């Protein structure tokens, strides 16, 4: 006679029996086992619900929302335990927490050591005493929810970074947060937990390359090569956290898509790259802000090219530099081609230096100072605008000699480019009217001219102190703004 399987809830082995051979009492006994198991599972599910509620009570933080979403998708069912003990899925989940080191993060930050101890205690088959059913349910539920919360916390920080954004970076992460709860549930159901972090980490190949470099450092028993130690100033064994970890974090903040054609300005490298499909099409040296006038880290889009620009001098420079210079030398403005104007509803009027009270800061704020186009202009012969809250842009400079220096942090925050004419030709590629001759003529005409781009070009100003070259070498740059340790 054929066999028939009686299903059992998770954690209870299925019982295979021959129904005709069982008496009524035996059948009732099997039914009681199933009912008891169902009751234990119901108690566990209720305990998980209570643990989730207690963990995320009254919190609107993203990590609490991730936890609630994870169990809502499961209708409250546990993922890592059954009604008797943690399952093999829990062991694999703990392995995921241990893999935090692959991302320059510490497993201890996600309670991995403590969760591992609890797992060992709950799976110890040699224990003589069993806890009461209600106590065991609560213990398993707390382990379950803490493990899930740790996984989701690690996942969020691998995906979009941890802690506040760096100074000068607006509004935290700019990478879209993946569906952490949904992706973790799918990974658990598909038996692919080991791949989960890889699926949600930044997509840029530079991130994976830094991971590989980090693994290489750790593979040397935590002692990196002497040249790496010398370049970072970190003690042996700490390089992976003080340098590579910081740069992995920066990649997590960046959007997945930079744009098919975009600019990347790396502040510590003092370099600009025009990239197409991820490959450099043009590169040149740049000058960036001093540590006291930092170039901010942000992304925007280049929209306008200005030939023969005026330099509209910021109020802070007027108060801190221009006004004191005029006090020392009344001919300072004329010698530097600087004019004073006052704007009103009736238009713009010129103001004579002799009519200005140079000792009244408030009066100075009512005036605008600008340097006329020409060879002396601080912006050189061209500027490239990507409108932003920082009033930062790319521009030419008359101080070409500074590009010969290895350290080039000299500006008030804007970015000076080494070869502005080549940059203009690249930006205006595809504009038939802007031939090489037309570009040169406009740059040196002395008449300001604005050119609106028909297609904006993304600009990403970044701060990377480490990069892996295509040949596998780890390149390092000085942390000019002292951000790595933060």
Image: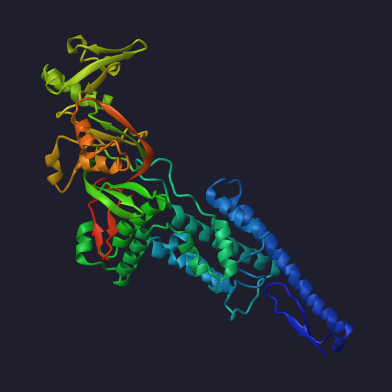
Which residue is at 70% across, 76% downward?
Answer: 12
Farthest residue, direction right: 24
Q: Is residue 226 visible?
A: yes
Image colouring: rainbow
Percent coordinates x, y for residue 170 in the rendering: 40, 40
Which residue is at 63% across, 63% downward?
Answer: 141
Percent coordinates x, y for residue 344 in the rendering: 34, 12
Percent coordinates x, y for residue 236 in the rendering: 25, 64
Horizontal relation, residue 320 to residue 259: left or right: left
Q: Nearer the viewer, residue 143 or 438?
A: 438
Q: Nearer the viewer, residue 17 or 120?
A: 17
Q: Quadrant of residue 375?
A: top left
Q: Nearer the viewer, residue 459 or 215?
A: 459
Horizontal relation, residue 76 to residue 473: left or right: right
Which residue is at 30% across, 43% downward?
Answer: 429
Percent coordinates x, y for residue 298 in the rendering: 36, 42
User: Is residue 409 depicted above or below 140 in this figure?
Assistant: above
User: Is residue 87 depicted above or below 159 in this figure?
Assistant: below
Which residue is at 42% across, 58% downward?
Answer: 203
Which quarter of the image is occupied by the N terminus? Answer: bottom right
Farthest residue, direction front: 432
């Amino acid at each position: 006679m054929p066999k028939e399987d009686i299903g059992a809830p998770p954690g209870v082995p299925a019982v295979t029996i021959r129904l005709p051979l069982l008496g009524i009492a035996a059948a009732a006994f099997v039914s009681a086992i199933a009912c008891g198991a169902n009751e234990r599972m119901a108690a566990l599910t209720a305990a998980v619900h209570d643990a989730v509620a207690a963990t995320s009570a009254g919190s609107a933080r993203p990590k609490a929302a991730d936890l609630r979403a994870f169990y809502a998708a499961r209708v409250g069912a546990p993922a890592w335990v059954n009604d008797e003990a943690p399952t093999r899925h829990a062991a694999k989940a703990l392995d995921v927490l241990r893999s935090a080191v692959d991302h320059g993060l510490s497993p201890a930050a996600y309670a991995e050591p403590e969760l591992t101890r609890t797992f060992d205690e709950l799976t110890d088959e040699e224990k003589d005493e069993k806890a009461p059913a209600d106590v065991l349910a609560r213990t398993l539920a707390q382990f379950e929810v803490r493990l899930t919360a740790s996984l989701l916390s690690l996942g969020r920080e691998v995906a979009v970074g941890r802690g506040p954004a760096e100074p000068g970076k607006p509004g935290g992460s700019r990478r879209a947060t993946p569906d952490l709860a949904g992706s973790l549930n799918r990974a658990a159901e598909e038996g692919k937990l080991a791949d989960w972090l890889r699926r949600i980490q930044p997509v840029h190949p530079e991130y994976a390359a830094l991971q590989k470099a980090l693994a290489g450092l750790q593979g040397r028993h935590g002692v990196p090569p002497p040249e790496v130690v010398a370049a970072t100033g970190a003690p042996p064994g700490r390089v992976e956290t003080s340098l590579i970890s910081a740069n992995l974090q920066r990649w997590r903040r960046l959007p997945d898509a930079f744009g098919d054609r975009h600019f990347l300005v790396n502040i510590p490298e003092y370099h600009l790259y025009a990239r197409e499909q991820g490959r450099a099409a043009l590169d040149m040296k740049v000058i960036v802000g001093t540590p006291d006038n930092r170039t901010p880290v942000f992304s925007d889009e280049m929209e306008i090219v200005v030939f023969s620009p005026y330099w509209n001098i910021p109020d802070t420079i007027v108060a801190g530099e221009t006004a004191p210079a005029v006090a020392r030398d009344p001919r300072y403005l004329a010698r530097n081609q600087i004019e004073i104007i006052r704007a009103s509803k009736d238009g713009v009027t010129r103001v004579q230096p002799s009519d200005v009270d140079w000792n009244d800061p408030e009066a100075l704020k009512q005036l605008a100072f600008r340097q006329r186009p020409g060879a002396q202009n601080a912006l050189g012969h061209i500027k490239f605008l990507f409108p932003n809250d920082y009033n930062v842009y790319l521009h030419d400079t008359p101080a070409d000699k500074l590009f010969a220096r290895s350290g080039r942090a000299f500006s008030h925050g804007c970015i000076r480019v080494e070869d502005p004419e080549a940059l203009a030709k690249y930006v205006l590629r595809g504009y038939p009217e802007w031939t090489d001759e037309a570009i040169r003529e406009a740059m040196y005409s002395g008449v300001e001219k604005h050119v609106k781009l028909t297609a904006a070009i993304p600009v990403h100003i970044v701060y990377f102190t480490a990069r892996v070259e295509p040949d596998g070498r780890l390149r390092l740059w000085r942390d000019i703004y002292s951000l790595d340790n933060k």
